[in-house]
Amino acid sequence: MAPPSSSCSTVHRVKRNLLMRSTWSELNGAMGDLGTYIPIVLSLTLAKHLNLGTTLIFTGFYNIVTGAIYGVPMPVQPMKSIAAVALADPTFSIPEIMASGILTGAVLLVLGLTGLMQLAYKLIPLCVVRGIQLAQGLSFALTAVKYVRKVQDLPNSASLEKRHWLGFDGLILAVVCVCFIVTVNGAEEDRCLRQEQDEEEEEVVVISRETQVRSKMRTMRRVFFSLPSAFLVFVLGVIMAFVRRPRVMHEFKFGPSSIEVVKMCRHAWRQGFIKGTVPQLPLSILNSVIAVCKLSSDLFPGKDFSVTSLSVTVGLMNLVGGWFGAMPCCHGAGGLAGQYKFGGRSGGCVALLGAAKLVLGFVLGSSLAHFFNQFPVGILGVLLLFAGVELAMASRDMNTKQDSFVMLVCTAVSLVGSSAALGFLCGMIVFVLLRLRDWTNGKPLNAIWKHEDPNEPV
């Protein structure tokens, strides 16, 4: 039995991790991950009969647990490579999807527990990680623009005709949402500077007793710039979904979906590993573990996460939920960047999102798919756009021309080849060649693999 002091310390840490600095900001931040979550889960629900209720319940539970453990808006996202294979291959059904998720989770768990993931984290250069992040961010942004410009057939992952300017899911609606978010949020540095200017102006008011009109203008400006922009845009999307099809209310069925154990034969395990696990593993290792760890240290300098813990949590999530039909999940640098962009700063951000998922999963279950099928895809594209831009901006710390070159090679190959693994391989080869070139020019041997962040403490 653990000593009382240890139990009290754990409870105190969980409370501190879930403590929210601002309820509205954290609620707004929770919306930053929905641009990737809803399209993928909805597509698999409609095309492959994924149990939406079960997925909501399990991912909601994962959100709350990871928020309590890490104390930052650690996202829980669907595994994108497995989802892409499932949507493209008619023979890749629910048993194969679950088998691939379980196997991917098992490999990540082993890598974490044996320390191999920590070794990979130390050996992989920062410029290569930044290349993967930049590629993923630009990929999100390009997908977002596609969502906004063209009508989407999500179950078939296809773009149809150009979107009309008018309508409940028109271009004008998406453009207005983009302008609103840019006006309210802007860049994070701009927002901080604006708050400092407001504080300085307050001091001036106290000293010189400014007029009441200017005081009211300043108050109105502060209220406007503190609006939960992403949350309001999401609420607008909910309203539009009901307006587009009012009868969707009658299609709701109250009560959770039945949770059943998925039966997986030997063929499902084999196909799941070959078609799902093999292409998913590089993306999970790079973007779900290593890139998330790097990005977390950038966004939250006081929080130190090990790749071992991230690898273990991703592994356990899939080893638990995969047997019951929950979509294979992982963490993601894009989701973390998106939630941070919109104001998420604590574990309470994702805990709020997790609680909402649990309520929806238990109350409405899989019948919620009828509603999400009416949700404006253009608004999802707007949320995804800002998440992608925020993730891509993490690569701005490449100060040397050599590191920037490696990063851009990695990014270009990842985008053109649609493979993070291929981009990673090319980036590593270029990095090694450049380091060997430096060595032949007289640099010491121990500097060949020196790629630490200059701001990182020794």
Image: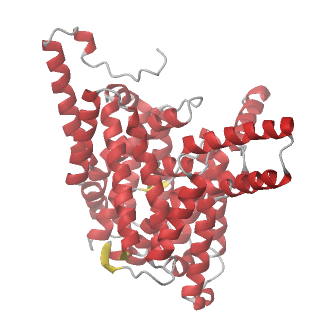
**Number of numbered callouts drawn:** 0
Quadrant in the picture for residue 115: top left
Q: Nearer the viewer, residue 317 or 27?
A: 27
Q: Residue at x 38, y 22 (%)?
A: 452
Q: Residue at x 60, y 56 (%)?
A: 184
Colouring scheme, one of rainbow, by chain, secondary structure, one colour: secondary structure
Left or right, residue 192 beside residue 35: right
Quadrant in the picture for residue 411: top left
Picture coordinates of residue 332, whole percent (x, y): 45, 48
Picture coordinates of residue 384, whole percent (x, y): 45, 60
Q: Nearer the viewer, residue 400 or 119?
A: 400
Give above or below for 158 relative to 395. Answer: below
In this view of the protein, can residue 112 be seen by the observer?
yes
Give above or below for 2 relative to 106. Answer: above
Q: Residue at x 35, y 45 (%)?
A: 134
Quadrant placement of the N terminus:
top right
In this view of the protein, can residue 265 be seen by the observer?
no
Left or right, residue 420 beside residue 26: left
Picture coordinates of residue 172, whole percent (x, y): 47, 75
